Amino acid sequence: MTILIADDDPQILRALTVTLGARGYVIHTAADGREALDGVVAHHPDVVMLDLGMPRLDGVQVIEGIRGWSTVPILVVSGRTDAASTVQALDAGADDYVTKPFAMEELLARLRALVRRLAPGDDDAPVVAFGDVRVDLSATTVTRGGAPVRLTPTEWRVLELLLQSPGRLVTRETILTRVWGPFHAKDTGYLRLYFAQLRKKLEPVPAEPRYLVTELGMGYRFVPDGADGADGAGGPGEARAES
């Protein structure tokens, strides 16, 4: 499990890195609010541990920035003990709040409880099949005609986002924000590149996509039964236009 720890106190960062690392967690750190947002985008942590009083962006601003595009669990670890700070952080989207100084065992227990409570069930990670492609969202594997297909981490995140919304339009801005972060919401060149790569690997005829279909000027749609049999899903000609 990967944890991003954001705190401007180097002693806190060092202590948590050593303690949590010794328990098998993979740790990334950030010393201010801007680094925290960048770290969430870069590392896609399973949990964010966050101080409120940080330079550049304070903790509440970081929480609001994360919640604009991610549901990652956020545990606030702060020296602010007043009820107003707790309420503000929770209202912004934090999942739990621990005050400094804290007992390490309590922090670990809160962390375990948070992960246990927010962990998705098996029903949230089904196997999706289309054409001769089979995608196991739980095992993060893809096969085509029974043979393994290798996707890059970014290709996987793009594909996963579409497969989780079968038949529904997923806007370009949504994909860019969820995969690359809120600072890349207008970088549509990324999408053309990665959809071209995905279609080469997964579509029967990449130049005439049936399953990963473009909606011109709007976004993309996963069509489980193929574009020829979908109502309003956008035909192959539309998909070619932005490939």
Image (cartoon, rainbow, N blue to C red):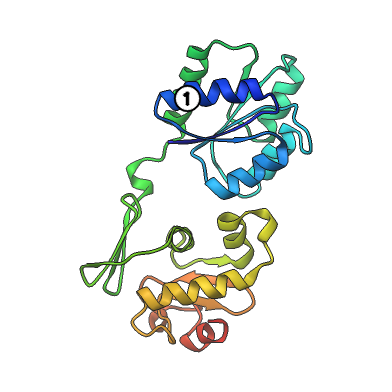
* Quadrant hosting residue 212: bottom left
Q: Is residue 130 above or below residue 141?
A: below
Residue highlighted by disc 1: 20
- Quadrant in the picture for the N terminus: top left
* Quadrant hosting residue 9: top right
Query: Which residue type does callout 1 highlight?
Result: Leu
Residue sitting at the far left: 146
Task: Decide which of 137, 11 is in the foreground and name it.
Answer: 11
User: Percent x, y for residue 92?
Assistant: 69, 35
Circle count? 1
Q: Is residue 16 above or below residue 222?
A: above
User: Percent x, y for residue 151?
Assistant: 38, 64
Kindly identify the residue that appears in the image at 53 percent across and 26 percent down: 17
Kindly identify the residue that appears in the image at 61 percent across and 67 percent down: 172
Residue sitting at the far bottom: 237
Residue sitting at the far right: 56
Task: Decide which of 236, 36 is in the foreground and name it.
Answer: 36
Task: Decide which of 96, 187 is in the foreground and name it.
Answer: 187
User: Percent x, y for residue 125?
Assistant: 36, 50
User: Percent x, y for residue 234?
Assistant: 51, 81
Q: Is residue 68 above or below residue 199?
A: above
Kindly identify the residue that appears in the image at 47 percent across and 60 percent down: 165
- At label 1, counting other C-alpha atoms closer than 10 Å, the crowd grade (few under 14, some 14-19, many 20 or more) is some
Q: Is residue 69 left or right of residue 200?
A: right
- In terms of secondary structure, where does tag 1 sit? helix
